[in-house]
Structure formats: C-alpha cells, structure tokens
Image (cartoon, grey):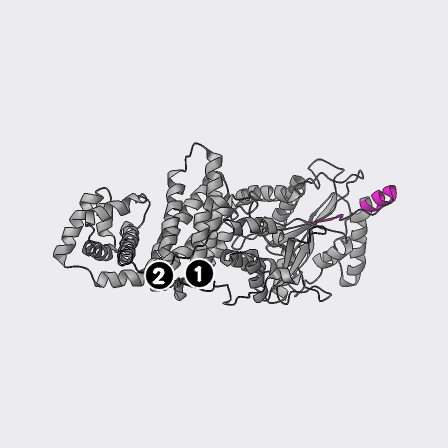
C-alpha cells in the first residue's frame, strides 16, 4: 500500500480532477467514501450531471472555509493549503470495500496529523474513490481553530501507518524505507510518462543514464560531454563569485513543459550521490593506470575479480567487526563502487549477457544508501578496477574471465543484501535481491558454455579418480558436495590443466578453497573452478613477464587504452566547461 503526499493551492482544480473522467476516461464511479464530520456534505459523484459543476464549487467552498477565515485574519494568502495523498494497493492485492477504504483514510489523516482522532478542530478532508485499487485523500491544511496542522514528516508517517494497515488487512507487505535511497518518482511524473508513451519517467531515465555515465567516466569533463553526446541537455549552475560550476541539471530529450521549455532535474534531485560535490568525490577516488613499457597487458577482468574477491572476503569475515561504524563505512563505500563495476561490466561483457547485467546494475542503484555520504577512498581499488574494464581490450568476450567475475559478484550481492537486512535497510535489501536475480541469470548465460567446453575435455576416468582423491585430501569437509556438483567434470579438467602448468592439484585446491568459505556456495565445484582458472592464468602471465625480463625486451610498445564505452556507444570529447 503506497501513499504519496503532496501539496498544492487549487482546491477547486483538484476536485475537478478527482470527480472528473480522468485523463483517459479511467475514472469510474467517483464518489466520497469518507470525510470530516460535516452534516450534509455534498458528493458531486452521486449527484445528477446537471448539478455536478455547482456541487464541485460548493464542496470547494466548504473545504476552504477555515482557509478563507485565516486569510481574512492575517491579511495574506495561505500558501500551499491543499493537502493531497493518494493511497494505492499493490498489484495482486485483494479488492477493498468502500468501508475498508474509509477506515484507511481515517487512519492516514490521523497518523499524519491532518485530522487526529477525537480532535474536532482538525482539518477538513474527504476521501474520493474512483478506481478499484486506490483512493485520493484531500484536505485543506488549516484547522477549524485557524492554526496550521502539525503534520511534519507526514509522508513518513503515512508510510508507517500503511505498513500496519497492510498487515491487518492481509495485503502485500511492502518494504519500509529509512529515507536513504534515491527518491522514487511521484505519481504525477508517472502519469506524465504514461501520457507521453514512455515506460520510464524522465527522472528514472535520467538517473539511470547519469549513473551509467558516471561509472564510465574518468573525470568531470568526460561525464558532462558523454551526457551531451547522449542527447541529454545539461544546464550548469555557476558560482557568482568564483565562476566555477557549483551545480547542474539535466533534461531528457523531448521532455518539455506546457510552454515548450525543457524540464530539468538537478543532479541531487535525481539521486543525492549525483550532486556535483558527491560526483567529484567519486571521480577522484580512482587511479586508472597504463602498463609500463615492455610489460604484459594484464587481464583486467581477472584483476577486477581479484579485487572483488577481497571485497566479499571482507564483507563475510567482518560482519561482527568490533567497530561497527567503521565497518559500515567501508561496506557503504564498497557497495557504491560495486554498483559502478556492474555498469561497466554491462558495457563490455559478452554481448548475450549485457541486457541482464544492465538490469542488475539498474536494480542495484537502489541498493545503495545514496543519501549517506560514502567514503569513496575506502573503495578506490574496486572503483579503479571498474574503470579499467573499459580502457583495455576486453577479455570478457571469451566468457571464462567474465564468468569468474560474475560468480564472485553473486557472492558480493548476497553479502551486501545480508548487511542491509541486518541493519534494517529493507528497501535496499529488496533492491539487492532484485539485482541478484538478474546477476545470476547473466552468470548462467556466461558460465554454461564455458563449463560445457571444459566438460567435453574431461580427463580419463583413471585421472579423474586420482583428482577426486586430491579433492578429498585438500577439502575433506566439502569433498562430497564438490564431487556431486554437475560442474565437477569441468573442475577436473581445470585441475588437470593446473597440474600440466606445474602446480600440484592438492595445493591448487587448498589455495582456492581458502579464498572464501564454501558452506554457503550452492555449487562449490563451480566456485573452485573459476578461482582455479584465474590462479592458473595469473601464473602463466607471471612466467611470461619473467621471460621477457630475462631476455631484456624493451621493444614492446605501451598499450594504448581503448576509448571507454558509454550506454549508447557514443562519446563526445568536448570539455563542458567551454560552454560556460
């Protein structure tokens, strides 16, 4: 059950909408289901059509009487005196009767301070139903005694009361927020998106684009030039004394108001972590590097997986850290950096997984506590690893390294979801779970072809039995689960390959198992498979590097970083500050 509190200044105008046909004739049988205690209150929805207009005016006058009395006494207009709160049930909820909706309305106006129970001096209000799944509560926010109501934090109070009502009426239980996530679009913004034929509101679309571009940008100039290349209009706020950019707003292409002017949303309104100052903090917490002359270009996907593995190890091992605040600060920073990694991975992963990875990244945007300032330097290594994925010849296309990274990413999201859950961040925990669904799908899409190829190369039964004995010796507590895992034949192939490269299988297994506990792994053989392949590839790279050093090679040119990818495949190079 979702309440949405807003204010306005036109009583008659809102009544016309509530009792009217709707923007697309979607209002059916509009009528009052509850109201303040006024005898003979007119209900335009139950009157003959020829009386409709006059009754709307009469009802507006009734509701506005305390407002007009206050204005006459003070000699000034009462600002934003119309209080409006639609309350909607969730999709799939049962049908509520008029009597049930009336009780919902009375509880909401009581909880918000608009009209407390037993207070005959409260504000005048009505609740109008014109659809099966919601009502509109409307009040004029001047009490009968001429005072303004004590309705501070009315939106939060309405949310809290709706959580109680859901439980009592057997409705779908929505997640309570702690008001640290990015703000959701309003009902007016959603209605506009429907009218203009968009699946997303302008705010949602801009937020997703800005988050993805921020994840892919090295500096502020690149951030703004890429947004411009996407067709997004950028408006800068310039400091009157310094002449520097102190803020910015974005407008979606084609999104205009009634006057034909672009509709801008400030960066901080899209999401607190997109404000200019928070954005600069994020961009500063990264140090992308270029390989030295004569060195082997590192596999950035394996580097990212290694860095990510350290993140999940920290999150799992330090859940009961003695300094809870310090631990939470680090997790907050790591979660923000991980969100950027999802965005950059979605741009460079195997093509058939990108849609699911993008969906995972978008869902994870709301798994961050964006109103809480993250100490981004605490996650500089992970943020740097995310940027490096975009600036090298991506090895994620071969599937194996991408699968290893996504396997570890699954554990990271599980750890972050648990952290949110233990801290009572219910909306963020729910968002992390939504991200996990998409991430697991992307992992399976990437991993299954690689596992199938390795399975086809399984060693002889004799060799496989010998390797199984090594599993029992190296990880006895998990050996049975590993050997019955469908991925065991692929792991046997990887063990044979590691043995061919000079590493004893028992030692390789023990080192891979020590990287993180296996108890919570649904498929422990797969987990060990990716760790083992990464370790083997790292050793091969080290040997190649050592061989080059021995031969004194100095002729290898410095690799040139590739152009970073952006959400639509375009990139502009103009410095936005030139437009000031």
Q: Nearer the viewer, mark 1 or mark 2?
A: 1
Q: Are marks 1 and 2 in contact (CB under 8 Å)?
A: no
Q: Position of residue 198 (x, y in %)?
A: 58, 65
Q: Position of residue 578 (x, y in %)?
A: 64, 62
Magenta segment includes 162: no
Screen quadrant of the C terminus: bottom right
Looking at this view, is 60 or 389 the one in front? 389
Residue 327 visible somewhere in the drawing = yes
Span of residues in magenta: 67-91
Q: Which of the 4 quarters of the picture holds residue 158?
A: top right
Q: Earlier in the sequence, mark 1 or mark 2?
A: 1
| Disc ID at residue 446 | 2
Looking at this view, is 246 or 532 the one in front? 246
Q: Residue at x 43, y 55 (%)?
A: 289
Residue 435 visible somewhere in the drawing = no
Give the labeled residue for mark 1: 391
Crowd band around label 2 with a 10 angstrom C-alpha radius: few (<14), some (14–19), many (20+): many
Q: Is residue 430 left or right of residue 27?
A: left
């Amino acid at each position: 059950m979702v309440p949405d509190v807003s204010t306005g200044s036109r009583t008659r105008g809102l009544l016309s909408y509530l009792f009217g046909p709707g923007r697309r004739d979607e209002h059916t049988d509009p009528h009052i289901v509850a109201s303040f205690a006024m005898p003979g209150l007119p209900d335009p929805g139950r009157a003959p059509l020829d009386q409709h207009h006059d009754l709307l005016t009469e009802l507006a006058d009734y509701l506005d009487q305390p407002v007009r009395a206050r204005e006459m006494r003070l000699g000034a207009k009462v600002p934003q005196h119309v209080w409006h709160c639609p309350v909607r049930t969730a999709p799939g909820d049962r049908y509520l009767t008029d009597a049930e909706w009336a009780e919902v309305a009375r509880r909401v106006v009581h909880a918000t301070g608009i009209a407390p129970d037993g207070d005959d001096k409260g504000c005048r209000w009505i609740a109008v139903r014109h659809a099966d799944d919601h009502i509109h509560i409307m009040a004029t926010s001047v009490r009968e005694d001429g005072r303004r109501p004590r309705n501070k934090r009315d939106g939060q109070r309405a949310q809290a009361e709706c959580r109680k009502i859901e439980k009592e009426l057997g409705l779908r239980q929505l997640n309570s927020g702690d008001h640290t996530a990015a703000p959701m679009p309003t009902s007016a913004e959603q209605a506009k998106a429907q009218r203009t034929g968009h699946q997303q509101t302008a705010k949602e679309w801009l937020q997703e684009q800005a988050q993805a571009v921020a994840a892919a940008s090295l500096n502020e100039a690149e951030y703004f030039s890429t947004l411009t290349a996407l067709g997004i209009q950028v408006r800068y706020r310039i400091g009157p004394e310094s002449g520097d950019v102190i803020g910015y707003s974005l407008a979606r292409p084609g999104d205009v108001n009634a006057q034909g002017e672009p509709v801008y949303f400030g960066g901080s309104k899209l999401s607190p972590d997109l404000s200019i100052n928070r954005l600069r903090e994020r961009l500063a917490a990264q140090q992308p590097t270029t390989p030295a002359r004569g060195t082997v270009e590192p596999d950035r996907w394996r580097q990212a997986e290694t860095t990510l593995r350290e993140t999940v190890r920290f999150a799992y091992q330090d859940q009961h850290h003695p300094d809870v605040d310090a631990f939470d600060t680090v997790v907050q920073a790591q979660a923000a950096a991980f969100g950027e990694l999802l965005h950059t991975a979605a741009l460079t992963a195997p093509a058939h997984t990108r849609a699911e990875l993008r969906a995972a990244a978008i869902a994870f945007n709301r798994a961050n506590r964006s109103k809480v300032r993250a100490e981004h330097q605490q996650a500089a290594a992970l943020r740097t690893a995310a940027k490096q994925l975009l600036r090298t010849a991506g090895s994620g296309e071969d599937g194996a390294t991408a699968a290893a990274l996504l396997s570890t990413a699954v554990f990271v999201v599980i750890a972050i979801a648990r952290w949110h859950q233990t801290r009572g961040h219910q909306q963020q925990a729910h968002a992390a779970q939504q991200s996990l669904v998409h991430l697991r799908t992307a992992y399976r899409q990437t991993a299954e072809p690689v596992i199938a190829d390795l399975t086809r190369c399984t060693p002889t039964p004799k060799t496989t039995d010998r390797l199984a004995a090594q599993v029992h010796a190296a990880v006895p507590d998990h050996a049975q689960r590993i050997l019955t895992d469908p991925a065991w034949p692929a792991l046997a192939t990887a063990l044979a390959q590691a043995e061919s490269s000079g590493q004893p299988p028992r030692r390789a297994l023990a080192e891979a198992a020590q990287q993180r506990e296996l108890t919570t792994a649904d498929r422990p053989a797969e987990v060990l498979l990716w760790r083992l392949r990464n370790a083997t590839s790292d050793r091969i790279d080290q040997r190649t590097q050592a061989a080059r050093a021995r031969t004194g090679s100095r002729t290898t040119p410095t690799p040139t970083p590739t152009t970073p990818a952006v959400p639509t495949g375009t990139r502009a190079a103009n410095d936005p500050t030139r437009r000031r």
